Image: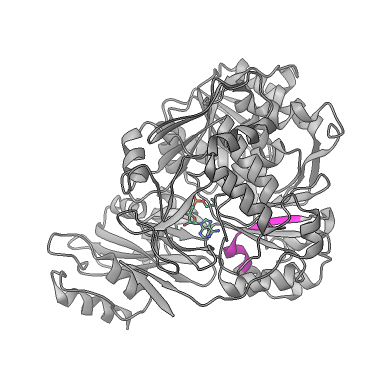
Amino acid sequence: MSTSSGNITSVLKETRAFIPPAEFSANAHVKSMAEYEKLWQDAAKDPEKFWGQQAETLQWMQKWNKVLEWNPPHAKWFVGGKLNISANCLDRHLHGPRHNKAAIIWEGEPGEQRILTYQMLHREVCKFANVLKNIGTKSGDRVTIYMPMIPEAAIAMLACARIGAIHSVIFGGYSADAVADRNNDAGAKILITADGGWRRGKVIPLKENVDKSLEKSPTIEKVVVFNRCNLSVNMKAGRDMWWHEEMAKASADCPAEPFDSEHPLFILYTSGSTGKPKGILHTSAGYLLGTSSTHKWVFDLKEDDVYWCTADVGWITGHSYIVYGPLCNGATVMMFEGAPNHPKEDRFWEIIEKYRVSIFYTAPTAIRAFIKWGDHWPDSHDLSSLRLLGSVGEPINTEAWMWYHEKIGKGRCPIVDTWWQTETGSMMIAPMPGAIPTKPGSATKPLPGIIAEVVDQKGNRVAANQGGFLVIRKPWPSMLRTIFNDDVRYKEQYWSQIPNTYFTADGAREDEDGYIWVMGRVDDVLNVAGHRLSTMEIESALGSHAKVAESAVVGKPDEIKGEGICCFVTVKAGVVVSEELKKELRDHVTKEIGALARPDEIRFTDSLPKTRSGKIMRRLLRDIASGKQTTGDTSTLEDYTVLSKLRQEDE
Ligand code: WT7
């Protein structure tokens, strides 16, 4: 069956539901659908009262006097309150049974192990906060963190939070140019990196990338380098310093200072539908409340859980669900540096067995890779410690869901499919696993305090099972506050489609049981292996190559990555196209953005299909890229022959 509304078509097929195991529900924080409904209804009736009560779970240095100040589209939460985010994640756990509890259990790709208890992590964070102060970092300064998945990445983030500096973590897979753009946009003064990091048996030369980026980032004054791989790197006197040398000089005494609830905590860059990445700004109290409450509800966290989120700290999932949410809740967090298939395809299952991981949170793209690698890998490990599984990043296809449920969860473990975004800061739609029966492919229902609806272009709710736009009606504590240095874009991007309503840019439908099924983006954003990439950003990278005249980038279905990157390219007059040029262009995009944006396919063409007003008709290109017949209206196409030529290329 297929239903549609406007240009969004929803295909209904999945009807199975999985009831939470009785024993799981009996021990859960939220035990039944009725309990969830009551929580949700109470929160919807009086959101400020609800969030005000929830905020009691944080440790305040000065209590707030107003829950919310809403001047659409700008929100201030817990006005007048003061707290320290790092104290909420560390100091509060030191005076009770958690002081010697493992905060981070880390394994490096080559196999080293480190365990940092809450007390040890606190000490490292205090020392590094003093290092930051010693090199001139002040509250409000921007600090770039470009690191591998090592505990020092979390230490650096928490140290920034401790002294009120604003961190901007850049995923280690980004190129030097991408690092420079982000340094410049943020006006970052300090950069924290490592000599390198391990990935699939190879060292990624982070410091070398940093050196290149610094030729174009004039605002960076100091660089702190952690020695991870014993690489010999260039250290510029007066600018670069070693982490271990500075730490040796630093005091471990760094009392947590109070900061305003709305003090900026971090900037995280993400792709939008234009070429320029957006610096999503998150602030303190509301963000911490959103991440910690959802981490507890959705993972149904217990004191003795060993919790593992496989994301990189360079993405929002790593910020919210490796660092801030779990540490605020006093959880034991597993952290792994490397790839799931190094040295072999069972590395994740080996880690789960070895550390008795109980909660495992990963992405559909990873699950599809596991399926491809074969069942013998998980089958050869004891996965009996697992009690809950999570998914994030894109819609999870039924096959992946069922495999995850049967092969990894052995039919015992509820699966929490969590829908949210960099902008939302924390999970918005996800099941409370003891309360809500799950349906494969649906993130189920909005969490308490979240009013999510599926609407048409005018903002009217569409009927059950009709496709529409997913929107959020009311502000929520962990929402982005603005786009750094670009409040105009913030308003346009998120709040202009439908008045006073947050526009997610995802298409969705709500079924007859109130379950939400997210169908994917409705803008020019690709979701490649869970990484958000803008087609425009890739087009502008291609456009910066001397031989390229014009390009159009679209997604095409990819079995593992969800979406692959297909580039239609016209070259400048006189340029001869060749397989070598294809490789050159793919390398060029990798250099400009990073390996995560490397095109899967380059197609040369004499011209691109355009409307009479000159707009590229991406819909047609998407059809061609995925090998489909052209569907829909082509009446505005300027030159009909373009299409048939593009198809010929295909043959
Ligand atoms: C976009 C946000 C926040 C987590 C990591 C990605 C897609 C995310 C789901 C899900 C269907 C999902 C959406 C969203 N997405 N989770 N469970 N089901 N789609 O963060 O890079 O900000 O991307 O990822 O399209 O808008 P992000």
Q: Quadrant of the C terminus?
A: bottom left
Look at the image and give the residue range highlighted in magenta. 359-367
Task: Give 333 or 204, whichever is nearer the viewer.
Answer: 333
- Residue 196 seen in the current view: no
- In the image, taking residue 13 as reference, residue 110 lies left or right, namely right
Q: Quadrant of residue 350?
A: bottom right
- In the image, taking residue 349 as reference, residue 171 lies left or right, namely left
Residue at 79% across, 50% down: 306
Please provide percent x and percent y for residue 613. Answer: 13, 59
Residue at 54% across, 63% down: 515
Does residue 436 sit above or below 490 in this rendering? below
What number of labels is visible?
Answer: 0
Residue at 82% across, 67% down: 381
Q: Quadrant of the N terminus?
A: bottom left
- In the image, taking residue 131 as reference, residue 535 lies left or right, namely left
Please provide percent x and percent y for residue 73. Answer: 38, 36
